[in-house]
Image: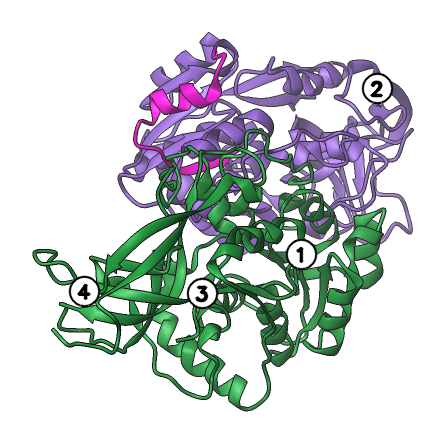
Chain colours: A green, B purple
Amino acid sequence: MEQGRQPAAARSRKVVLRAYIDRAPREDDMELVDGGDVALRVPEGAGPAVLVKHLYLSCDPYMRGRMRDFHGSYIPPFKPGSAIEGFGLCRVVDSTHPGFSAGDIVSGMTGWEDYSLITKPEQLRKIQQSDIPLSYHLGLLGMPGFTAYVGFYEICLPKKGEFVFVSAASGAVGQIVGQLAKLHGCYVVGSAGTDQKVELLKEKFGFDAAFNYKEEPDLTAALKRYFPDGIDIYFENVGGPMLDAVLLNMRMHGRIAVCGMVSQHGLTAPIGIHNLYCLVSKRIHMKGFIQSDHLHLFLRFVEDITKHYRDGKIVYVEDMTSGLENGPAAFVGLFSGKNVGKQVVCVSQD
Amino acid sequence: MEQGRQPAAARSRKVVLRAYIDRAPREDDMELVDGGDVALRVPEGAGPAVLVKHLYLSCDPYMRGRMRDFHGSYIPPFKPGSAIEGFGLCRVVDSTHPGFSAGDIVSGMTGWEDYSLITKPEQLRKIQQSDIPLSYHLGLLGMPGFTAYVGFYEICLPKKGEFVFVSAASGAVGQIVGQLAKLHGCYVVGSAGTDQKVELLKEKFGFDAAFNYKEEPDLTAALKRYFPDGIDIYFENVGGPMLDAVLLNMRMHGRIAVCGMVSQHGLTAPIGIHNLYCLVSKRIHMKGFIQSDHLHLFLRFVEDITKHYRDGKIVYVEDMTSGLENGPAAFVGLFSGKNVGKQVVCVSQD
């Protein structure tokens, strides 16, 4: 077992879920708990495992679904009293697994705590450090970026010149969808919830147009204004009234990639969608997807996006919150649109 | 111009739409009007046209959409005061078009009247008389049959052994979907609105199981009972609460072919669908379609279905109403499920 420069033990804190909820999460649904001193070694008899120190944690809307007592989903709920889980970027402190050594930087599903023992390290991905900011491996080069990549190319099947609409467009996924669509020669409009985000879409991400949906009393009319000839592709991040308005504005043979509504999973009263009859008259293709079904494309994704990033053709905006203790507020902020860009929590910089 | 055995003129009646509606149609929304004597010849100067006598008219749910003052659909609304239109099976009485002769039997879009002058006869399809009942060209071998064929094979992409659910299963389309699915080696369950229809599904059409949805207080639980392992394919004919219940019971990577909801087109308050978030967690593919996009498959469809029919592997049930004057009641009956099987109106037998 390799010995790092770490002390033999360190204080570890964790963010736990207090109890299941069936509404939008609040900060006090979570609690920062002192986890006591943890030995900075994989315990004897633990088998091949790694002990990691967290550098960055990712705040993603799908995590809301794990706060409900709902077991029919593709991923089980959190356990009240235990650390909540999410994608994280970590440094390996100790390893008894032949594939990992102290000092490795890895990303994968992990706990919201200072240190975690990971007993199935095969699910971790080793990160090669480069000119790309480490935290981008939770966004641009992580699950959100891959969601955008798979959703746009594999589900939306875009053609040059098509009309593309992206909701929650400045978010972790939306900002990449819009930029990929522009690179593909599409006309791209995004919606967001503040004027600042709308500016970002137009000025930083190069969307052809963007609007603040909160200032539009009639979403159907707004979309008609931005897409007088209709929408070919909708990258669906929000559900609800926006989806209904989009359905009325779709063109024939349009495609809708659905990923965002996962945040409504298990809601006691999910919002009703009334205009599905448009699927028939317009022959619309609506497809739910999850990035993890398409992992065979991950290497190509990393190559493509890295090249675009280095060529200055894709930029990424993240919203960095400092300190594990501020994680709950950062996560909760997702649901009121507080974050500008991808929400990340920096737990430690070393 | 060929002279038939027809007299030079005949009395023609027509069924007209009184005014636009935005609710389920009632009998008195239509009116039988005396059209006076019509000369049984294509008028001089009409160009290449045919004058037809109607034998059978088809009652189809999509026609409800044409009774609304809604111009955004794939097909324009009816004109109040004019004969309503639908698929019909007719005998050519006179023709100035080189492709048609008196005595030909044709099917196509036509008016609800005794005689029609059709000025674009290119849209008509000539029917070869055979051992197959003529009226079946409006059902089994017509638009409903082709809808079933295209929807099942092209949209549902079935695999042997999959679990298939069909709503409105004894209707013009559903009865064929179920039988094709059985021929394909699937497990098939259908729903219908009377015990008599449920019997028909099991005894006549060979569904593995069937249930009366009106006797199920909890559709989600009912589907769970019939599909303990979930539904791979749903042939969606009804929308509303049944679709919501199906979404909760779908399996991973399930497919939903949507054709029926077209009857909700332009409704002032279409029913809300609440469980679309299932599209994501189950990676469901939901696709609206209209048979006329797939006409390149029509000849193959006719060959396949004719063979199945002659081999006794497919049967068809139609509900025949006699007399143009009874057409409005027959059509209205579709929306309360009065018809058992494909609803046809017999206008004349010669």
The label shown at residue A41 is 4
Q: Is residue A315 visible?
A: yes
| Contact flag, marks 3 and 1 (Cβ < 8 Å) | no
Q: Amino acid at mark 3?
A: Val
Q: Are marks 4 and 2 on the same chain?
A: no
Q: Are marks 3 and 1 on the same chain?
A: yes
Chain label for disc 2: B
Quickly name the residue at label 2.
Answer: B29
Identity of the residue drawn at 34% across and 82% down: A128
Q: Where are the magenta residues, as a range?
A: B216-236
**Which numbered disc flags the more N-terminal residue, 3 or 1?**
1
Percent x, y of residue A294: 38, 63
| Tag nearer the camera, 3 or 1 | 3
Q: Is residue A228 visible?
A: no
Q: Nearer the viewer, residue A84 or B221?
A: A84
Distance between the alpha carbons at the discs numbered 1 and 4: 38 Å
| Contact flag, marks 1 and 4 (Cβ < 8 Å) | no
Q: Determine crowd level at label 2: few under 14, some 14-19, many 20+ residues with C-alpha closer than 10 A.
A: some
User: Judging from the image, what secondary structure is the residue with disc 1 in?
Assistant: loop
Chain label for disc 1: A
Percent x, y of residue A251: 70, 57
Residue furthest to the left = A45
